[in-house]
């Protein structure tokens, strides 16, 4: 396999850095919360936060990373002797060197070289010529966290510049793919024992890891980024229009989404479950918003409901509130389930706003706007499908509640058809059909691979994707274990010369 | 110094600080994350501005409330500035055009990118989608580099976004280079923690005396530590280059370049003394009086968008005047309805097609001329924005620098996306300038339209934002006669003649 100039040494994403720092210093015995990195995640409308190119470093980010390392070093050295495991003031040489070895092994996620330990100990010695021991240890921590060996995922191979990754590099790739953080001691031991050589070994380990609660953050984040969900704290609605909606409800929507993902995957669900499940998790506030039977006793009492009017990921209140127009909902189906990228008109956002304004003053109805786009040859090539899929979800308003009429007063119409003519009555039927389609299963598989490798698929990878998707996606757990143990994740591709 | 910032932050529950009524927010007399000036730093010539602050808002003003139909007295939108007694230090500049509107694009994407870079935008593909990007640095960054002798500017970029609690927000306006956007910091508490690190605190570990014969103690211990760390980190980047693919190498080098920029700013940190004003480390340089005053904090509960904006105005004024930054920016695109309700804004029209009522849709409805109430709303909002501008100016004007106030040595530029907020017009845009703009007399309204247009949405003639950028460069001693890419725009060279 050859890959032209493909990125593999990607920088850790912000959530990965935060989780890694937390785990790293917990292993070093630090009880305090490690400060979080105050950087926004990159925009992931078309990609994932794990993409190498999504994590290019701006000057602002470099500055922020530097100050973050200093904030971390300040916190973790509060109990200096506890961190070092000895008294730096009395046994400086061996104490500091021992700490350097442990710090580097965890931060670099492999046994450090002698030079790397020397370097960490060296910065301590340089600083403590003038400063107290704590300042020297702070510098060691800052050096480890600013190091490219911490910041970038390893691409070290067993030999040469391509082929199987080293056991430690592979353990790290596996850990970040499934847990989004550094390998734990068990995984590091497997690497030390070279027990991750074969696909079967990796697949078995991956299965165990996916069952671990530590996989949840990644599963949630992947699906949230896949659907380009808004953060709950970014959802704002006019209380005059949506009197039931408030910040607490937005947080509830976020929790509902996460619970749905946790439940679907942990119960062995696959793509069909993710797209068609009628399960809804609600507390008393969400029951009120969604018009569910009142079974919850309060905001802290979460109850599972089975409903018929909404299905899977695209029926989640958080998705429907994030994608708050039928155009966005329909476009998400096409781009994220069919892996077909739409050409975005330059003035698309103006168009959406103008349509909203026209609808609000009665100049245009929802269905009238769809008819207008269908009649415009420039619009119809994309909007025939976008609007059809979006229409199936138009029975939900901008906070995800069911509705029978549009705000223009006309009754909701959810029935539509594929561009190829197959009809569907509503979003449930649409999702049922989509979940069984091979191209949708392959697209979902492709998205997980792109998440794992940190870049778009290359043509050379498509055969492997087709192989992995050949049996569909009966279980997310199995899919992830298969991807983790595939050549795409276990081997570093050659860099082609014809780049 | 009064109560330490450390205590204020960590013992008052919520990380919030606002200047209380009549209170003064003090700043640290310490180095910041913004690199201190180097020993050979640029010095403003007499009469020249020392620093630049750019304030930017999404959309634009209600034109008729800002631009006088005749005469030179600005409209009621600028009343808060006049009420603050700052009319004589402010000028409204009208009748200039964004001259890069030849390509079809969403104006919200195109204009912010081109307004201060003065270059056509381009698009970058990624993952099947595309995004708009700039082709060069914006003018304030070029000025900041000039002030910092070619090094990365000492800049502080703040903003307010619809979502208050995020740390940063992407900006389309400010760019350090092609494709390198400069985000805005949103949370004042984090700005304080990061930028004004160490104010009022001291490392609890006592510093041990230097070992005999170990040489002079570094003038700035934190910078010395940073340099010690960065030197080694950069060495690691260098040694890693040979082990990655060519694509990865580019990314690693790009990352290393950014770290190198920080390190360059620390060159003076080791060994000898280093002048640098209040933000520097040379004790012989007098510290401005306002930088050592006791802080006065208001109630630290419940941040609101309006209060965060007030905090940002205060931080910008004091950070720049205390020598912690040469370039300050503030950016606000739009705000949620509940954020502006305290201003008496409550008649925004409802939207039915999706989304919550927001600036964008309301500007459109106002532009359509079918809802006068939206116009009243936007005048209220514009007056509030002007009051924030006035707050920034007042803060600076209250700082005595001996031969004038900090306002007298600061160039301030307030711009918005469009000439007319609703019309998304790129013709006949305005700028409000204040402080030291390099010589021109301030006060009133100056129209540069060559065709008499004042409130029209259409192009106003020959003056462009390119020209205004040249004025700004010249004011800081950069002798260039053109800025940006004017190849496809005839005649837009040289400064505007006031």
Image (spheres, coloured by chain):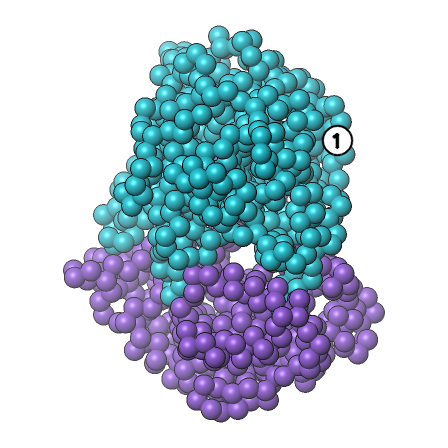
Chain colours: A purple, B cyan
Q: Position of residue B315 (x, y in %)?
A: 60, 30
Q: Is residue B268 left or right of residue B365?
A: left
Callout 1 secondary element: loop
Q: Quadrant of the N terminus of chain B?
A: top right
State the residue at coordinates (54%, 18%). Answer: B408
Q: Mark 1 — on which chain does it sit?
A: B
Q: Position of residue B418 (x, y in %)?
A: 51, 46
Q: In this view of the protein, which residue sits in the foreground, B263 or A202?
A: B263
State the residue at coordinates (72%, 23%). Answer: B23
Q: Position of residue B392 (x, y in %)?
A: 61, 28
Q: How many marks?
A: 1
| Label 1 crowd bin: few (<14), some (14–19), many (20+), radius 10 Å | some
Residue lying at the far bottom in this picture: please name it. A422
Q: In this view of the protein, which residue sits in the foreground, A209 or A59?
A: A59
- Above or below A49: residue A89: above
State the residue at coordinates (57%, 62%). Answer: A353
Q: Position of residue B349 (x, y in %)?
A: 69, 59
Res B48 → quadrant = top left
Q: Is residue B267 left or right of residue A270?
A: left
| Residue on which disc 1 sits | B298
For the question of whether residue A426 can be seen, the reply is yes
- Above or below A486: residue B15: above
- Above or below B311: residue B88: above
Q: In this view of the protein, which residue sits in the foreground, B375 or A146?
A: B375
State the residue at coordinates (39%, 57%). Answer: B104
Q: Quadrant of the C terminus of chain B?
A: top left
Q: Is residue A454 left or right of residue A218?
A: left
């Amino acid at each position: 396999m050859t890959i032209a100039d493909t990125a593999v040494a990607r920088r850790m994403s912000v959530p990965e850095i935060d989780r890694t720092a937390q785990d790293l210093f917990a292993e070093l015995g630090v009880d305090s919360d490690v400060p979080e990195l105050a950087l926004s995640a990159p925009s992931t409308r078309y990609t994932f936060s794990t993409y190498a190119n999504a994590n290019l470093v701006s000057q602002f980010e470099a500055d922020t990373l530097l100050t973050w390392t200093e904030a971390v070093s300040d916190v973790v050295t509060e109990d200096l002797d506890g961190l070092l495991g000895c008294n730096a003031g009395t046994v400086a040489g061996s104490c500091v060197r021992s700490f350097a070895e442990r710090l580097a092994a965890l931060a670099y996620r492999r046994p450090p070289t002698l030079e790397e330990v020397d370097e960490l100990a060296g910065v301590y010695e340089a600083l403590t010529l003038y400063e107290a021991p704590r300042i020297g240890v702070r510098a060691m921590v800052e050096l480890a966290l600013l190091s490219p060996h911490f910041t970038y995922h390893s691409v070290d191979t067993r030999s040469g510049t391509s082929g199987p990754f080293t056991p430690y590099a592979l353990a790290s790739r596996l850990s970040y793919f499934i847990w989004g953080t550094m390998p734990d001691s068990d995984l590091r031991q497997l690497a030390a024992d070279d027990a991750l050589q074969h696909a079967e070994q990796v697949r078995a380990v991956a299965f165990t890891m996916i069952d671990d609660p530590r996989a949840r953050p990644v599963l949630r984040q992947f699906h949230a980024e896949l659907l380009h969900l808004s953060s709950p704290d970014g959802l704002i609605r006019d209380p005059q229009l949506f009197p039931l909606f408030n910040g607490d409800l937005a947080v509830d929507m976020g929790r509902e989404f996460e619970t749905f993902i946790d439940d679907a995957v942990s119960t062995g669900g696959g793509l069909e479950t993710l797209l068609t499940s009628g399960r809804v998790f609600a507390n008393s506030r969400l029951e009120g918003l969604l018009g569910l039977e009142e079974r919850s006793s309060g905001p802290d009492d979460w109850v599972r409901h089975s409903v018929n009017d909404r299905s899977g990921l695209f029926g989640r209140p958080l998705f429907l509130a994030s994608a708050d127009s039928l155009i966005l909902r329909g476009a998400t189906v096409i781009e994220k389930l069919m892996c077909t990228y739409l050409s975005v008109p330059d003035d698309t956002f103006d168009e959406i706003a103008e349509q909203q304004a026209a609808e609000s003053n009665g100049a245009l109805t929802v269905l009238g706007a769809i008819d207008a786009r269908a009649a415009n040859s420039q619009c119809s090539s994309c909007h025939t499908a976008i609007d059809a899929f979006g229409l199936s979800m138009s029975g939900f308003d901008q906070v995800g509640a069911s509705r029978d009429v549009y705000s223009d007063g006309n009754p909701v119409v959810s029935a539509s058809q594929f561009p190829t003519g197959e009809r569907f009555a509503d979003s449930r039927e649409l999702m049922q059909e989509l979940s069984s389609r091979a191209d949708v299963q392959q697209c979902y598989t492709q998205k997980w691979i792109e998440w794992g490798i940190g870049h778009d698929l290359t043509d050379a990878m498509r055969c492997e994707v087709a192989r992995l998707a050949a049996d569909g996606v009966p279980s997310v757990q199995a899919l992830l274990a298969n991807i983790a143990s595939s050549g795409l994740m276990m081997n570093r591709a050659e860099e082609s010369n014809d780049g | 110094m009064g109560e330490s910032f450390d205590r204020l932050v960590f013992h008052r529950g919520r990380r919030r600080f606002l200047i209380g009524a009549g209170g003064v927010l003090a700043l640290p007399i310490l180095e910041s994350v913004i690199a201190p000036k180097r020993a050979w730093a640029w010095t403003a010539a007499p009469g020249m501005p020392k620093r630049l602050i750019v304030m930017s808002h999404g959309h634009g003003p209600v034109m008729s409330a800002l631009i006088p139909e005749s005469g030179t007295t600005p409209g009621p939108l600028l009343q808060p500035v006049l009420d603050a007694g700052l009319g004589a230090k402010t000028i409204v500049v009208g009748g200039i055009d964004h001259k890069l509107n030849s390509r079809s694009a969403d104006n919200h994407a195109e204009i912010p990118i081109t307004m201060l870079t003065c270059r056509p935008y381009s698009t970058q593909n990624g993952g099947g989608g595309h995004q708009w990007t700039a082709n060069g640095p914006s003018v304030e960054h070029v000025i900041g580099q000039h002030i910092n002798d070619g090094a990365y500017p000492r800049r502080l970029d703040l903003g307010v976004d619809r979502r208050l609690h995020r740390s940063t927000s992407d900006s389309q306006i400010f760019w350090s280079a092609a494709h390198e956007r400069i985000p805005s910091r949103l949370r004042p508490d984090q700005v304080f923690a990061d930028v004004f690190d160490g104010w009022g605190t001291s490392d609890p570990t006592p510093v041990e005396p230097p070992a005999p014969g170990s040489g002079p103690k570094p003038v700035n211990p934190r910078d010395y530590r940073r340099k010690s760390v960065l030197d080694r980190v950069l060495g690691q980047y260098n040694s890693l280059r040979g082990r990655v693919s060519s694509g990865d190498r580019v990314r690693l080098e790009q990352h290393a370049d950014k770290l190198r920029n920080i390190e360059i700013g620390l060159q003076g940190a080791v060994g000898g003394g280093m002048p640098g004003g209040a933000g520097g480390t040379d004790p012989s340089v007098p510290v401005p009086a306002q930088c050592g005053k006791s802080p006065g904090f208001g109630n630290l509960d419940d941040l609101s968008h309006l209060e965060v904006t007030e905090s940002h105005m205060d931080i910008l004024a004091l950070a720049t005047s205390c020598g912690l930054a040469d370039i300050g920016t503030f950016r606000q695109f739009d705000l949620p309805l509940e954020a502006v309700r305290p201003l008496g804004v409550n008649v925004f029209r409802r939207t039915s097609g999706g989304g919550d009522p927001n600036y964008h849709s309301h500007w459109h409805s106002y532009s359509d001329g079918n809802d006068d109430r939206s116009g009243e709303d936007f005048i209220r909002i514009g007056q509030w924005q002007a009051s924030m501008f006035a707050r920034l100016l007042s803060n600076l004007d209250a700082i005595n620098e001996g031969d004038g106030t900090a306002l007298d040595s600061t160039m301030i530029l307030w711009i918005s996306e469009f000439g007319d907020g609703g019309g998304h017009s790129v013709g006949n845009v305005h700028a409000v300038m204040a402080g030291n703009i390099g010589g021109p007399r301030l006060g009133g309204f100056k129209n540069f339209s060559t065709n008499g247009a004042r409130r029209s949405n259409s192009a106003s003639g020959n003056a462009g934002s390119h020209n205004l950028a040249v004025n700004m460069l010249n004011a800081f001693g950069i002798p260039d006669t053109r800025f940006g890419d004017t190849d496809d725009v005839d005649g837009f060279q040289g400064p505007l003649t006031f």
